[in-house]
Image (cartoon, rainbow, N blue to C red):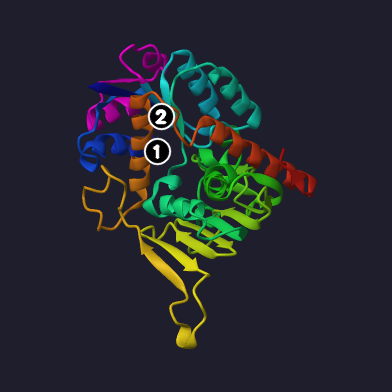
Amino acid sequence: MDEMRIGIIGFGFMGKAHTYGYRTMPLYYENLPFRIKPAGVCTRKLETALKAKEDFDFEFATDNPEDIFLRDDINVINICTPNSCHKSSIIRAIQAGKNIYCEKPLTTSFADAADVLKTLENSSITTQIAFQNRFFPATMRAKEIIQEDKIGKVLSFRACYLHSGSVDPNKPMGWKQDKKTGGGGVLLDLGSHVLDLVYHLIGPFDSLIAKKSIIYGSRPDIEGKIIPVEAEDSVLLIVKMKNGSMGTIEASKASTGMNDEFRVEIHGDKGALRFNLMDPNWLEYYDNSLPDAPLGGLKGFTRIECIQRFNKPGGSFPSSKLSIGWIRAHVHSLYSFLCCVHERKHANPSFRDGAYIQYIMEKAYESDSTDSWVTID
């Protein structure tokens, strides 16, 4: 039986989320054809890595990524570092012949993403980027419904990801608000998820116009020093797609009252779909072929109870009938990746998908700086 021996680089919030996925996967999926062992953990501060080792039963801890890359007994590298560190870690892992699961965004620029793809040429390793919102039963069912032509020709759509984390002017800046480490602001953080799900469900982009905003010109850093803000708190895009549809995409951390509001609505000539991450148990579907009738007949949005109805072997634990949560999509994304590693095949969403989203985000920044529509090649 294969053993997936994982080396995790970076152990902040996402490092913990991915570790949860690896640790709990055998509970969620019966009779896995491989064993999973989170073997090594690497962080910038050794004391953080040592605590992770103690708390989560890693075999070893280090503050030197080479201790992960050079281990012959590690076959999967999981990258959870700040964005600016992704490229160097990915390229080093490719050179070491390791399979790679990387947090989004792929890199901080399209040029860096292109370098990653060039390094990946002729490699047989399996790679996947963490666009986990593809892996809810509701969003997987949405993809099926679109492929079954149940909504017909897509006419329009709107998608947004809304948080309120930037509303407080006294909240200290973290690395995601620092362009040097994050590469940008909310577009790379939340917007990348929206762009990917729109791309996954509707297809490639044709052109866009975008505008970003910073709500406060300065903020305290973690030490209390007031510094200028360069990374955007919100961004709005109007986009045209290759299939002729047009829609809006918004990402914001300046949305008072919002927690994790990721909404997607897609309107076609045969029907429509709605999904909201704050209520991920349901996909709403509108069948436009139903006739009008007195008192409404049966016309209207139907709530499809997706809940935890994953294809087998998923969904057996805790139960396909029980409420799903945010982290469950991360577990299924990691499961899909490890199955592809085990089967020695290509995984999705791929690094090429990640590079494409990087390109779209760069075009959005170009549009903002030029106040004009830009074409997607």
Image spot of residue 62 (x, y percent): 34, 19
Q: Give neighbour class at mark 1: few <14, some 14-19, many 20+ (Cα, 10 Å).
A: some
Task: Look at the numbered discs 2 and 1 and tell me whether their residues touch, using CB distance below 8 Å.
Answer: yes
Image spot of residue 357 (x, y percent): 59, 39
- Mark 2: which secondary structure? loop
Highlighted range, magenta: 47-75
Q: Tell which residue pokes out farthest to the bottom in this image.
A: 294
At 37% from the left edge and 36% from the top edge, which residue is drawn?
336
Which one is in front, 171 or 294? 294
Image spot of residue 173 (x, y percent): 53, 44
In the drawing, does residue 330 fall left or right of residue 156?
left
Q: Which residue is mark 2?
A: 10
Q: Which residue is mark 1?
A: 14
- Mark 1: which secondary structure? helix
At 53% from the left edge and 40% from the top edge, which residue is drawn?
176
Indicate the quadrant where residue 33 lies: top left
Task: Please tell me whether residue 209 is drawn above or below residue 38 in the rendered image.
Answer: below
Residue 324 numbered tag? none
- State the CA–CA distance, disc 2 to disc 1: 8 Å
